[in-house]
Amino acid sequence: MKRVPFHAVHSVHKSRQRAGYGVKKRNFIFRPHIILSGLAFSLFSCSGGETAIPPAGEPYLLALPAQYSTPNLPEDNPMTVAGVELGRRLFYDPILSADSSRSCASCHLPERAFTDGKSIATGVNERPGRRNAQSLANAAYQYRGLFWDGRSATLEEQALLPVEDPNEMGHDWAEVERSLRRHPSYPAWFAAAFETTDTSQITRRLAAKALAQFERTLISAGSKYDRVKRGEATFTEMEERGQHIFFDTSEELPEGECGHCHTPPLFTDQTYMNNGITEAPALADFRDKGRGEATGQYFDNGRFRVPSLRNVALTAPYMHDGRFATLEEVIEHYNQGGHYSENVDPKIRKLHLSDTDKLALKAFLETLTDSTFVNNPEFRNPF
Amino acid sequence: MKHLFFMIPLAAALLFGGCNNTDDEGQPGRADLELSFEPITEKPNIGDVVTFQAKLFNRGPLAADGVTVENTVPEGFTQVGDINAGGVFTAPPVIRWAGLSIQPEETITLSFTAVAGKPGGDIGFTHSAQVTASNQPDPDSTPNNASGAPKEDDEAVLHLIPLAGEVSLNFKASYGQDPLVMFEREYAYEDNMAIKMQLFQFYLSEVNLLREDERVPVMDVGLISFGDVYTDEQALAGKSSGTLVAPPGNYTGIEFGFGLTPELNATIPPDYPLGHPLSENYWEAASSYIFFKFEGNADLEPNGEFSDKLTFHVGGNGNYRQLSFDKPIAIEDEKELTLQFNIDLQKMLVDQNTGEYLDFRQVTQSHSNESPSATFLADHVAEAVELE
């Protein structure tokens, strides 16, 4: 059989990509649009009787960056100003933990883009958890599962789990509900958010809804990268070089293969991948099976959620087990091409980056830091 | 066009929706406006002209004037015409009758015609109307407060079910005679090479049923992925486009685009909500979606190690391919038909006539619109896809 000559493959495709680069400027024109959460909420039946308790108070106007796709906000949890504020209080209140020592914010600190700086998160009594605490930035946009293994489908479901995890808050929701009901302030805050008329109506489900409402406000889209895309800033030479490596868009530079999975504008494609950090001759060999633990699917073993790289310079250490302390270590891992297992993603391959290339890639990654996000007073501790 | 015009007694109505009036006795000293729809009992087909009639009735003892009725044309209907009683259609989809006067016990008929199009995803149309203004108070309703689910007698809603069958496109992937499964299966390739798969996916767009010189659209865009096909059983079951609504009729074939039409490819992910097929797989640097992906590992030595990575991502308008298949296709009302397609990856990689093939010893990736390997793959799509 004859072979098709493909000697010119790389030069052709790179030059094409460069020619097309930057054309889609409207993709990054900053046109924040407002979503009035829960507008479609159906309140009444034909007979005029109520079929659902309406959210209480003023709707929360969620400003969505124009460069992001519209998130799917649940109709059964429309955001309100009071609901978001209740969620913020719950987020920062150690009342959710068994010994009142830990809050959500203990592992999700705003100054670290809502991570904790530890390899493995620690819970009550300093008990080590299983995995690295993930950033909550742009949680509203995560629609293919939460946690490293994607075991929770929604923020509302996710918010229920850490409270009763013995390695996290180690508490019991029934106890939490009792504490909230007899608290001097929470009954009024729940009433403002959900029109509860009796403390018995304060439940874990409403608490989770409030937490989810607050988490949906944690939108990060104000990095230097975004400003460059809007024409309000320019990359340095190193950042520009790093961008080309990241997106494989230069004929002269090596391809970093990063942008396939860390797809802009969220810098994640929200899939689950094995990025080759652990060698496993058989897929059953993974000590932490990751996605496979959630799905029971053998070929998902060793796969983990592709995290967003927004604010990545603030979220060290890296990977699901926090094994890499620095971005340099992460870049070196990818540069080496990873370790073998059957389901390592084919895009993990040796990159042949020079030392300068590595520095450039790091410089580009640092442009994803959003200081307005981490310093937003509306995301800080209200107490 | 077939013209439907029905004045059916209420007892015969099958498709009437709305609130029953429970306030049968008009209150003294007031007008009492009620709005209802004449039921439509015959299902319209695409292209049929349908007459919609709303009845405004004054049950109260006093006349009302300054009455305005707004009628929302059902989504999917076009070519609105024959609006009676001075109604205007200046702010689609709303037809507005303003300044109406109505005497006690009088009924005013408000009507228009429109041409039925393709119904929405729930296989139906929703027609609604309400009184939005009146110079007289009404004992049991407030103008212009409709919520979409009638709770007052000055609102009306009609749910209209069209003639519609269902069709789905089911794709099975193979490699030659073998089912295409991900991961551990080894597929022999040319010149003593072998491959294992990890991902095969593609967009299909602008799916049209064909009859005579007419194209009947049934689907805008879909994403078919075999990335979670791990067993022969799953491969033989295939991946479905999902159920699509189609007007009944006898068709001569079907066509669709492999990849995205230039119009769709000119859009960008923020144009779509998360979860929509076009909210992902966008290649910003190339201003294109990735029409199809083929990823896996190759054993090139051969030594059984499959250590060479294969990633072929193909997009760009130049690689869009329109495929057309001739086959009698009968769509019947309320029946579902599955069209079985097979896509043979081997035929995309190896030209069955000339023997040319992608040589993985020379190229293991293409993330390009115009690379020779991308063009080769796109050029062999037509040969690879068959309608059973």
Image: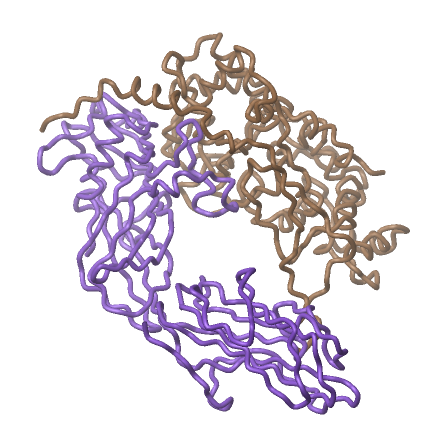
Measured as percent of width and height from the top left, residue A345 is found at 39, 31
Measured as percent of width and height from the top left, residue B361 is found at 22, 22
Q: Quadrant of residue B104?
A: bottom right
From the viewer's side, name the closer residue of B181 and B112.
B112
Considering only vertical position in the picture, is B200 above or below B245?
Answer: above
Considering only vertical position in the picture, is A278 above or below A359?
Answer: below
Measured as percent of width and height from the top left, residue B27 is found at 76, 88
Q: Quadrant of residue B294?
A: top left
Q: In which quarter of the image is the N terminus of chain B?
A: bottom left
Q: In this view, does A365 lie to the left or right of B334?
A: right
Q: In which quarter of the image is the C terminus of chain B?
A: bottom left
Apparent colour of chain B: purple
- Determine if residue A147 is in view: yes
Name the residue rendered at 30%, 70% in the picture: B248
Name the residue rendered at 47%, 69% in the picture: B125
From the viewer's side, name the closer residue of A155 and B20.
B20
Measured as percent of width and height from the top left, residue A258 is found at 46, 25
Q: In which quarter of the image is residue A104?
A: top right
Apparent colour of chain A: brown
